[in-house]
Image (cartoon, rainbow, N blue to C red):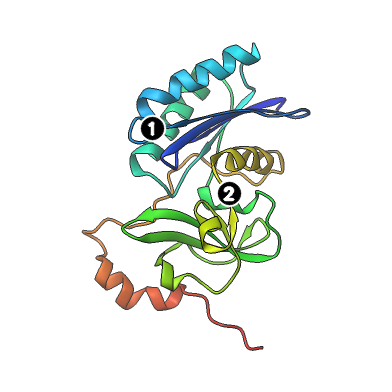
Amino acid sequence: MTTLLVIDTASEELGVALVPAIGKPSVRTAAGGTNHSRLLIPLVDALVREAGSRADGIVVITGPGSYAGIRVGIATAGGLALGWGVPLSGVPTLRAAAAAGVVGRFAAIHPAGRGEWAVQLFDGVEPVGPLYPARREELPSLPLAGEGAGALGGAEVGVAERLVAAARLVRDGLAGTAEAVYLREPHVTLSRARWRRERAPETFPKEEPP
């Protein structure tokens, strides 16, 4: 695929990018807040008009992140892919953060609300643990990367960086389907208190012996 359109609505700030196989990506971001559905299509339209051509493939960040934002992003990406007749791929938020230039073993994080973070361990771009929620004091004692990680002494990875990294994952054959990735299971199936009692000990990384 010559040019990829990447859509990221996992955060309050939303972004779109046209990423050519060769050359500099064109990136647009906007302070979305709760207005992702109103802002996304005009943002894509402005980017495509500026470039003078549509994309050959579409990529969407699939979460975790803003529940409403993820739904808007995936629905819009699917509609554009159908209308343009191009393939659609999905990249999870934390994998896009992990692919933004961090090396070695680290924890990718993303704000999850309620004073919590979505966390997943990576070795390079490969996940080596499950996705789980954690409070600040529960974050693993590993280097951190992702949105908000800069304030915690880690590598800050925002929307613009995730957009370009997601395109790179697609070109490397490491993308998946455009299915939403949610951090929390429905409360009717597993309460927060029960999760912490039964599941949390299995997901927190164990300290390796020196």
The residue nearer to you, when weighing 38 against 201, is 38
Where does residue 15 sit, x and y in percent of width and height?
51, 32
* Rendered view: 81 above or below 10: above
Quadrant that contains the C terminus: bottom right
Where does residue 143 sit, x and y in percent of width and height?
61, 66
Q: Are marks 2 and 1 in contact (CB under 8 Å)?
A: no
Quadrant that contains the N terminus: top right
* Rendered view: 112 above or below 68: below
Identify which amino acid the numbered label 2 is placed on. Val
The local crowd at label 1, few if under 14, some if 14 to 19, many if 20 or more residues have their Cα within 10 Å, is many
Which element carries disc 2, helix, strand or loop? loop
Q: Residue furthest bottom?
A: 209
Instruction: Name which quarter of the figure residue 10 lies in.
Output: top left
Q: Is residue 14 left or right of residue 27?
A: left
The local crowd at label 2, few if under 14, some if 14 to 19, many if 20 or more residues have their Cα within 10 Å, is many
The residue nearer to you, when weighing 36 against 129, is 36
Q: Which dot marks residue 157?
A: 2
* Rendered view: 79 above or below 110: above
Q: Residue furthest left?
A: 188
Where does residue 66 sit, x and y in percent of width and height?
38, 44
- Mark 2 to mark 1 CA distance (whole Å): 22 Å
Q: Residue sitting at 44 percent across and 34 percent down?
A: 74
Marks 2 and 1, the one that precedes in the sequence: 1
Q: Residue sitting at 34 percent across and 60 percent down?
A: 115
Q: Which residue is mark 1?
A: 72
Identify which amino acid the numbered label 1 is placed on. Val
Q: Is residue 158 left or right of residue 70?
A: right
Where does residue 24 sit, x and y in percent of width and height?
73, 29
Q: Residue sitting at 48 percent across and 28 percent down?
A: 77
Q: Which dot marks residue 139?
A: none
Discs 2/1, front? 2
